[in-house]
Amino acid sequence: MVSATNGTAAPPGPPPGPPPTKENPYLAHLSPAERAIGGADASSSSSSSSDALTGFLPRRVTSKQVLAALEAPMNPFTSTPKPYSQKYRDILAKRKTLPVFAQVDDFLQKFQENQILVMIGETGSGKTTQIPQFVAYSDLPHMKRGPDGAPMLIACTQPRRVAAMSVAKRVAEEMDVSLGQEVGYTIRFEDATSKPHTFLKYMTDGMLLREAMHDKMLSRYSTIILDEAHERTLATDILMGLLKPLCAKRPDLKIVVMSATLEAEKFQKYFNSAPLLKVPGRTFPVETFYTPEPEPDYLEAAIRTVLMIHQAEDEGDILLFLTGEEEIEDACRKIRAGADELAATSPEICGPLKVVPLYSSLPPQQQQKIFDAAPARLSPDGPPGRKVVISTNIAETSLTIDGIVYVVDPGFSKQKVYNPRIRVESLLVSPISKASAQQRMGRAGRTRPGKCFRLYTEKDFVNELIESSYPEILRSNLANTVLELKKLGVDNLVRFDYMDAPAPETIMRALELLNYLAAFDDNGNLTPLGEIMAEFPLDPCLAKMLICSSDLGCSNEILSITAMLSVPNVFLRPNAQRQQADTAKAAFAHPDGDHLTLLNVYHAYKTNCYDKDSASNWCWQNYLSLRALQQADNVRQQLSRTMEKFDLDLVSNQFEGNERRYYENISRAITCGFFMQVAHKSGAGKSASYTTIKDNQIVAPHPSTTLDHSPEFLLYNEFVLTTRNFIRTVLEVRPEWLLEYAPSYYAPEAFKDDGEVKRIMQGISRKLKGGASSGNGSGREREKKKARKG
């Protein structure tokens, strides 16, 4: 025991003075040294870093204690005691002005008294950065140990990678700790956490779902915060369905559901009348303008509006919403050119303009530029500088950018759409909802009164826009979700507690695909192959392709192709240099298709790029995205670790003198995964077209393909709905491979109509006596795996 006066060991027998302090039962899980923190008269000689938390009892903390700890001289969350920096003090002063700070008492009371709390906080209220920190003071996770001896964790899920990374960085600064140590983030193919130190983790909702596969009780987590729940992503909806029954099994687990819109009643009802906490946003009035007539070209209208604001409006930054990377980069170039022209012709009216893009595939350091200050005036009496952020709908709710006064809203975003009848999932540019339009407008009123320029008519806003976006689960291919649910132990997919149940046809299509891929048996149970497929953070078709590649002796090459298919497009095609870019691309082209072209690009990148400078120069000369290739390299490394975990050999076939066989085996492996995505050629000459097998959709190879001929059968990676039905990333395949690796799908009797494909398969079946009985690739590899494990 430690003396309360001088910190030395007390002598045997009853000590003089008052009786010893009773041991605190709430701190029994801590070591004796750590337990002293909870004592009402803990010694000043205990660890300096603990002084700020003196008297704290887990989940019995008051707002007064938290506010006092925030002002303490020493940081209680660092692994080694250190004083707070001046930067921390400066940030703290700004944090105290956030609306959520005024309700810290209400939050702590409701959080500590209830297992589940629903919280509505308007964008800009500070909920994403502050609530996890308040929870840290209540839970004290860094002082508890999970089953593996590491600190307990607070998870805050985000629907987007950009938000998880940028918010984690901001919170690490606010807590005066190191990013990747006490505060970290986890996104697909990137883990910036430290097992011995991290206690607050921002992560994409999909990553928490994957963790639940291995730990169904989520035993390392003391609190899970589902942020931006109003976005109703597929992963968030499934997480809510898993966490709801888990709360009954784990009374110590707390759930906070945070939303930026007023769908509170639906969340409360789903979580058995959970209490509600409302936090007002920090909003100023926003004046809204509509166009008198519909705009024929919203991109051109958006660029024109931004330049008009720059010329005619008072100081303040601009936020423009567009739909995707290509559109954003195009707008950046045009706005920069327009601003340069204005600066040259009217320097007395227009100050410097800084244009900053924001989309999910940007590297973190470039994403952070959105928080940079606007450029300074060029002269003391000159017009002020201005910043323009051009973003996807990431900036709608996930991120708050200070200084935005003007919002330009064309009224569109890219949304995932799935048609189960023809098995086509596409990202389509679609009108936004009224709720999204209101969120966008609210971005203009964070720092002072603002203006929102809607590039559509008021009549369209009232009559054409739906009230709120449909949940992703209602418009997605559920194959990956069904595979994950089976891995999580959910057997009855129809009776799973969905907040909004998907159409039965969508679930049946997913089960059908997984059965053909041999991930499920005919009774709907997970097969050994399906168990392995679920471990890969990939589409089931890609996972199957990767697993089969070992048996075909080309897993190294398929690993590279999978990585290249998992990152944004590597080919750059600037408007002013399209011919040069096409010539550069042709140097990598493989006549049999785009998958092999991507493999050539990756091999050339690894051969020619020794360091950062050589990589940058080589990519620039060949019109390739260095960022995408670096991402592919990282993805490949992580997938290779998963393959090694399951004893899937990383092998290659001999290339020299065996080129034809080398590429054929790669094509065969791709066929193992994508045999359901094949189109057949009909007609000849210029009138020839392709029709997808069984779904009978007329399609054409995308103009970007490197395929130099029109083969009879064409496998595709993606179905693209634009002005026409295009198939993108295509590969020539042979009909005998289809029958060999998917006999149940391509057996002649599986075709309802007596078409040409059925006749071809009948002819192959007759030639290959016993060909069908050779089984599909998945059956063979399962037997081989069993033999290896045996």
Image (cartoon, rainbow, N blue to C red):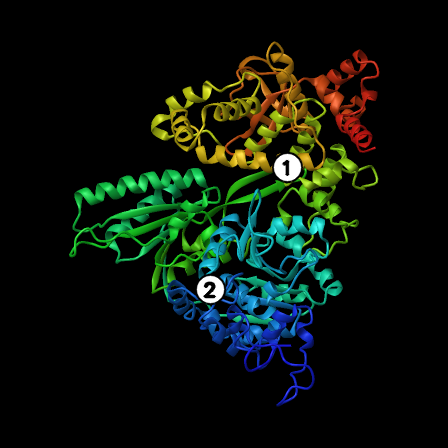
- Judge left or right: residue 254 versus residue 740: left
Q: Report the residue marked by disc 2.
A: 82
| Amino acid tagged 1 | Arg
Q: Quadrant of residue 715?
A: top right
Q: Position of residue 125 (x, y in %)?
A: 46, 66
Q: Residue furthest top?
A: 657
Q: Is residue 676 visible?
A: no
Badge 1 element: helix
At label 1, counting other C-alpha atoms closer than 10 Å, the crowd grade (few under 14, some 14-19, many 20 or more) is: few
| Amino acid tagged 2 | Lys
Instruction: Please tell me which residue is depicted at 67% across the width and 24% down the height of the picture.
Output: 669
Placement of the C terminus among the 4 image quadrants: top right
Q: Report the residue marked by disc 1.
A: 641
Q: Which residue occupies the foreground of this view, 299 or 326?
A: 326
Q: Position of residue 638 (x, y in %)?
A: 60, 38
Q: Position of residue 712 (x, y in %)?
A: 63, 16
Up/down of 773 relative to 695, above or below: above
Q: Which residue occupies the foreground of this view, 523 or 560?
A: 560
